[in-house]
Image (spheres, helix red, strand yellow):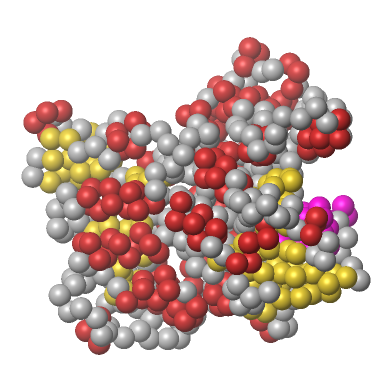
Amino acid sequence: MIHEYPSIYIDDFRGSLDRPPPELCFLTHMHEDHTAGLQRKSYNGPAIYCSEATKQMLLNFHTNFGKGVKKYDHLGQKGLVKALEIDKPYHFPYNGESIQVTFIEVNHCPGSVMILIQPKNPGKAVLFTGDIRCELTELNILRRTPTLYPYLKEFASANPLTLYVDSTYTQHEEPEKGYLPNMTGIQRLIELLKLYPPHIQFCIADMCTGHEQVLIELARSLQTRVHMDAYLYNYYQKVAPYSPLASQLLSYACTSGVVENVSLRSKIAPIEEMQTNKTITPGRIHLCHRNNGCSVRHVDSPTVYFKACNQPTTEMVDLQNKFFKIKEIGSMELMNGNIYKGPTQRYYLHQGIYYPLFPFYYYSRHASYPELCEFRDLFNVVNIRGLDGADIMESKTQHIGLSKIFHSSVEASSSDDELERFQAFCFIGNPNIQNPSISSAHSNMSSHETLEMLHSDNANEMVNTQNPDDAVGIVEETPEDMYVRMSKQPFPWAAQLLTSHDNDQSFRNPSEIIFVDETQNKILSLESKLRDNPNLWFSFCFDYSNNS
């Protein structure tokens, strides 16, 4: 919720009794955790304004990885999705006044933007970042963006600005630490994959948009192509005229052996007919789904699934990516063929070397805490909130709250007005604030057990489960429902924890037992356990936004 403009809806279109009806609607990018409410066939709100690339992605998105219907086709039929140019100011009537809205391109995925809202009164200007990665390169671009000049702190006449920022970093281990630059992570991934035998195939485990840069650099460095199915190829074709990333990725695309997708009724030219470098080998890298007709990725040729990891902790990543010589450690537990099970990984045995099948690489589409501090320091900030509008304090998960970013920019002052303002910002003495929520929940699943599911027939379902960006809208569920769901594969440890601690009274915090129902007691107990166990938090993070 945008507190300064409560009837402007951004990235959440469900509405509630606590908010006035929408007067203006904006969408920062087409990841499904930001389109909640738009999937309803009965949606009859105002038009949704977004970038042209986002519009194409939204209106051409099919369910079930291209085999189902167009999920948002009803919006297109009603003409409710309208594109705005980037870096061009637009004026909209709002509450009897005129406000100026400008889209500013950001680094997250094709078409993603942040939104600057400027009223006649400069004291109520708002910058809504959406999901954003702000490395030094992006910060320098923003510093040179003319639309933002009036709010840059380096100018003496800087106007006040309220920030609504991506706070995904709060859900990670050691959130106060930074992430490696994306290009460094990509280069390390390239060096790692070059060590594999040439017959090994690679598939990216992150199936949502935003990883185009990784695929482009891999294809260029490994001199191969990126194999796509018909749905993804056509999807990127729609976006390519408005996104250089999508266009560049298509130049490395390979569609050899693709089976025609019945729902799309479109054929793709084979690789020989594409005007690209003929020395590049056919698709060794895969951005496709076996169920959509990938005949290039053979079952008898092992596939390595590489997955992004933006945690600053390196020990787990190094262990996950480690190669072992059989003469040094002997034989591991044989699973099938040449696939072996190790302590933290599964391996492919080739010429006396165990090659990890599920390596990690450092890559993040979201800003780290140090990056957000640098981002904040660009502007004359008077307030900072999460994307859901919440002032986020030091939460009970002991993660860093957004108030720390804001607090470090507030000068020490004896002014009672300043103290009251900051206290109000930090919820001090406010009994009505019970449970601050964490916005933009993006779990970073890293367990090799979850990645193993990608080899199974439930691969598509598994990817949807693990990527909140790929989830079908935002599902409203009770805590009981969540834990029933979590107790099933691929989360067997949730059921184990609930069972093993049924009779462990010391496991519970009596102050948290506020429900009579035993199921709720176990839920609260499990939350307490997860808060105290960073290893489990690394595998799964809660979204408290639906928890009363």
Residue toward you, 433 or 377: 377
Residue toward you, 383 or 361: 383
Snapshot quadrant of residue 234:
bottom left
Residue 37 visible in the snapshot: no
Q: What residue is drawn where x is 19% and y is 72%? A: 280
Instruction: Say if 460 sits above or below 525 in the image.
Output: below
Q: Position of residue 540 (x, y in %)?
A: 53, 38
Q: What residue is drawn where x is 43% and y is 74%? A: 244
Residue toward you, 139 or 308: 139
79 vs 258, left or right, is: right
Snapshot quadrant of residue 155:
bottom right
Q: Main secondary structure of the magenta part?
A: loop
| Outermost top residue | 506
Instruction: Say if 355 sits above or below 299 in the image.
Output: above
415 vs 245, left or right, is: right
Q: Position of residue 159 (x, y in %)?
A: 73, 55
Q: Where is residue 83 in the image (x, y as percent from the top left)?
A: 64, 78
Q: Does the magenta stretch include residue 260?
A: no
Report the quarter where the N terminus lies: bottom right
Q: Does the magenta stretch include residue 6?
A: yes
Q: Where is residue 324 in the image (x, y as percent from the top left)?
A: 17, 35
Report the quarter where the C terminus lies: top right
Instruction: Say if 97 sits above or below 222 in the image.
Output: below
| Outermost right residue | 96
Q: What residue is drawn where x is 54% and y is 69%? A: 111
Magenta span: 1-18
Instruction: Say if 332 sits above or below 238 in the image.
Output: above
